Image: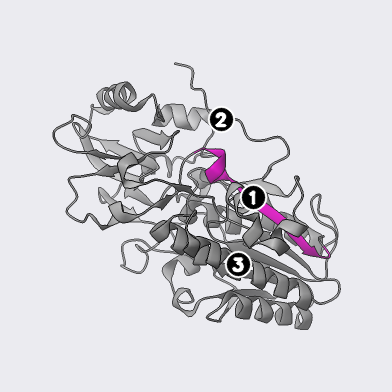
Amino acid sequence: MTISLPADPPGARSLTGVVPQVLAALEGRSDWFAPATSAIVLVADGLGAHNLSARAGHARFLSGIRTKRDVARTVFPATTAAALTSLLTGTPPGVHGLVGYRVLDPARDVTVNQLKGWDEGAIDPLTWQRAEPLMAREAAAGRPCFVVSKAVFTGSGFTAATLRGAQVLSAPTATGRVLIAADLAARHPGALIYVYTAALDTAGHKHGWQSEQWSAALERVDAAVRALSDALPRGAGAVVTADHGMVDVPRHRQVLFGADDGLADGVRHVGGEPRMLHLYTEPGRDRRVLETWRAAEGGRSWVLSRDEAIGAGIFGAVSAEVRPRIGDVLVAARTGVAYYDDREADKRPQAMIGQHGSLTDDERIVPLLRLGAFA
């Protein structure tokens, strides 16, 4: 059948190109950015372009420097593990292999968390993530590379998988991190500096992006970006972007499936996340599972087979090693719903309000704002 998927907005650049273009700007040959003496990439986890527009009054500095062209499209799935890895390797999920929040490890027939599984010893950060981190490549070539984040992330397996090669520093606040980054940019010509803040994503998951808590977190991010702009040394450039946007899904919009509705029949493992399920089927059951889900949920979600998804190119090029990590059936929410396997004993994830992962513009279009030499 013909699969009708949303088209990327005209002029939206890919998140996978951001760091390669920043590196090109350090050598005076970027198509996106003006030449710079050093560069900072600031990621505000969960800051979608739509979210920023809707809460512009809480982000006066960000809104003041934004133009219509200052957007990028994140990868699919629109989730942190996949998107940050794509940003930091310059490759799509089909190449680096982090194709969702929770995906199948085919060798062991278990699903693995792509953010926390490294630290649980479930996956090896040096081999499971299959693409060379850009920081590792650049550091090996002699470029000063730095990461500034919260202390809790500095020794994580995900950091090793995506940012190895860089010197890692920490500060407890976003403003503290950007000031460290600006100082590094001044002291290390040619440096590439990555700064990360998770405050918006954390507030959004717990309270929703339309909450007062999210708006307060946005105000703190806005203040940090203003501080970065003020502190940038002459000649340095900075980019402010995000890994994904967010939609709010209240409890009455949750779709709980289980043993009594037939949606779990033939499903061996459920991976992905509530807005984008990977369904791994029992042998020979993939067609039946696809038909069942398409009949039940095709009106509010894109329901695709693995072959259809790969053929549509939504994971980018897909290597043979990554292919079995993708679900036999994919369910990507098109409307404001989220899916939960209600057979799971742990119901805490069902308390999450802010969601992301699917193909909608609200989840996939993120800001790409410029400071300093890049403005």
Q: Residue 235, percent across and down?
A: 85, 71
Snapshot quadrant of residue 196? bottom right
Q: In this orientation, does residue 353 appear?
A: yes
User: Eyeballing the image, is 50 above or below 196?
Assistant: above
Q: Is residue 194 above or below residue 7?
A: below
Q: CA distance from mark 2 to mark 3?
A: 31 Å
Q: Residue 167 placed where, x, y %?
A: 59, 78
Question: Whole-Å distance between the Cαs marked 1 and 3?
Answer: 13 Å
* Other-residue count near label 1 (Cα within 10 Å), few / some / many at <14 / 14–19 / ≥20: some
**Amino acid type, callout 2:** Pro
Residue extending furthest toward the left = 260
Outermost residue toward the top? 1
Horizontal side of residue 300 vs 351, given as left or right: right
Q: CA distance from mark 1 to mark 2?
A: 21 Å
Where in the figure is residue 94, as x and y percent of width and height?
50, 43
Specify which label sits upstream in the sequence, 1 or 3: 1
Name the side, left or right, on which 175 lies relative to 286: right
Magenta region: which residues?
359-373
Q: Earlier in the sequence, mark 2 or mark 3?
A: 2
Residue placed under numbered mark 1 in the picture? 53
Q: Is residue 125 magenta?
A: no
